[in-house]
Image (cartoon, rainbow, N blue to C red):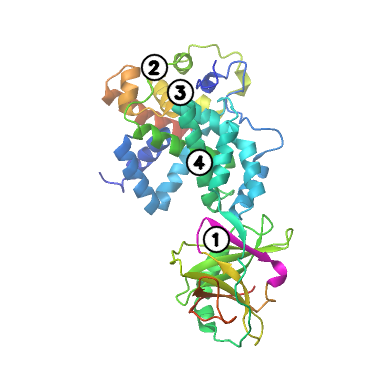
Amino acid sequence: MRYDDPQLRELLAGEYVLGTLPARARARFERLMRADPELARLVDLWSARLSPLDAPTRPEPPPPRVWQAIEARLPKVVPLRPRWHESVRVWRRIAVGALAAAAALLIFVLTSLPPAGSGGRVVAVLMDKGGTAGWIATLNPRKGEVVLTAVRPQAIDQAHIFELWAISGRGPPKPLGLMTASLAERATLPSAALPPEGGVLAVSLEPAGGSPTGAPTGPVLYTGKVL
Amino acid sequence: LTAGDPAGMVAAKGGTPFGAMAEAPGTGKGELAALIAGTAAGDRRAFAALYGATSAKLFGVALRILRRRDLAEEALQESFIAVWQRARSFDPEKGEPMTWLIAILRHRAIDQLRRRAARVEGQGQSEAALLTMAAGEDSRADRGAELGALERCLELLEPPARQAVMLAYAYGFTHAELAARLPAPIGTVKSWIRRGLERLKRCLDG
């Protein structure tokens, strides 16, 4: 089939929304749509055209178990885990170069985020040396906390964990706590722990239980300037 | 009409006027858009409020399409997980919140229909009533001035094409299932749908 024929595209988009496509044609169309924003746009337009047909359908309250099941599947919000060891040593090798290299991506990430005020302001995007975002830190002023949301899941073995650090000025990194990079978990920390603007949040890979020295011992994987 | 009966499509008489979106009071599209934006930012209270404001309507649509409460519950659950994950992709400049939510639900409900080898058979009472309505045999006096643009355009279709389009949308029937129900040869059903969609688009966009 030729998917560049405008009439065919229009028809398939309409039939997709109508629900008439058989399973395989439907799956094929969905694959095309993911790679073709224009096709997705045609689908949106058909959804809007036909949506009045849903208007007369009577609302029916779903049983409470549906919401309970949904809630159970949301990411758990957990405080940063406490560290086992507390000691301070000087450490300041932060990959500042990576920050500049990743500026373009930062702008992309920020502009694709929801508007401020709806539930949190982005205060830092933590990126690796290649400019790939690992965590986004958002400030919730109402609750006085910063939430770290992992952008992509990273499986690590039981013997390791991610540790979050705050660096202000030329001072040594201050350990903030431990977290996983699971999409099912969001770490929170009090907003007072956030370094001032221009400071840096960094993530290093540490032995389970946290850095034994109080300074990062494993590789610093992610850094993000506080905005 | 039982709770699980996909009767909503024919509730126009004495019920919700065709073309008017039934929403809980205090949750217009501005509020819903704000709740979706809050959900995109990870605000659980916004997400819970969004569920509270829209889940009954979405569950009604899921029941209409799937005709089984367990399947409708599953579709509703999967839809709200998708809403939580994809709330960022909603653009209030480009679409209505309720249309976006229903599209997510329809996507899952119809996928579920296609996955199931044997669908729940039987033409419900409401389907018969819908066929009658789609055929234009009911009285229009009680709907009068409230005819929406879509319904006005549907009136322009030949009755069998109108039936085919409305049944497909209401229940997610494939061409073959429509052919068995109307009844008509599958090639004829396909051309009704194709011509029906073309005319609807011209009428609605023009």
Residue at image mark 3: B156
Report, in whole angstroms, how far the alpha carbon at label 4 lies from the one at label 3: 34 Å
Pair 1/4: label in front: 4
Which of the numbered marks, if any, corresponds to residue A112? 1
Labels 2 and 1 within one chain: no
Report, in whole angstroms, how far the alpha carbon at label 4 lies from the one at label 2: 26 Å
In the displayed structure image, the side of residue A122 where residue A1 appears, left or right: left
Q: Are circles 2 and 1 on residues that touch, CB within 8 Å? A: no
Which of the numbered marks, if any, corresponds to residue A71? none
- Tell me the residue at 43%/67% (across/down): A157
Residue at image mark 2: B122
Q: Position of residue B205 (x, y in %)?
A: 49, 37
Report, in whole angstroms, how far the alpha carbon at label 1 lies from the one at label 4: 22 Å
Provide the residue span drawn in magenta.
A181-193
Q: Is A192 in the magenta?
A: yes
In the displayed structure image, the side of residue A28 where residue B21 appears, left or right: right
Q: Amino acid at mark 2?
A: Gly
Mark 2 Cα-neighbour bin, 10 Å: few <14, some 14–19, many ≥20: few
Q: Is B114 in the magenta?
A: no
Pair 3/2: label in front: 2
Query: Mark 4 belongs to which subunit?
Result: B
Labels 4 and 3 within one chain: yes
Labels 4 and 2 within one chain: yes
- Tell me the residue at 61%/23% (across/down): B17
Q: Are circles 4 and 3 on residues that touch, CB within 8 Å? A: no
Name the residue at the front extreme. A84
Query: First in sequence: mark 3 or mark 2?
Result: 2
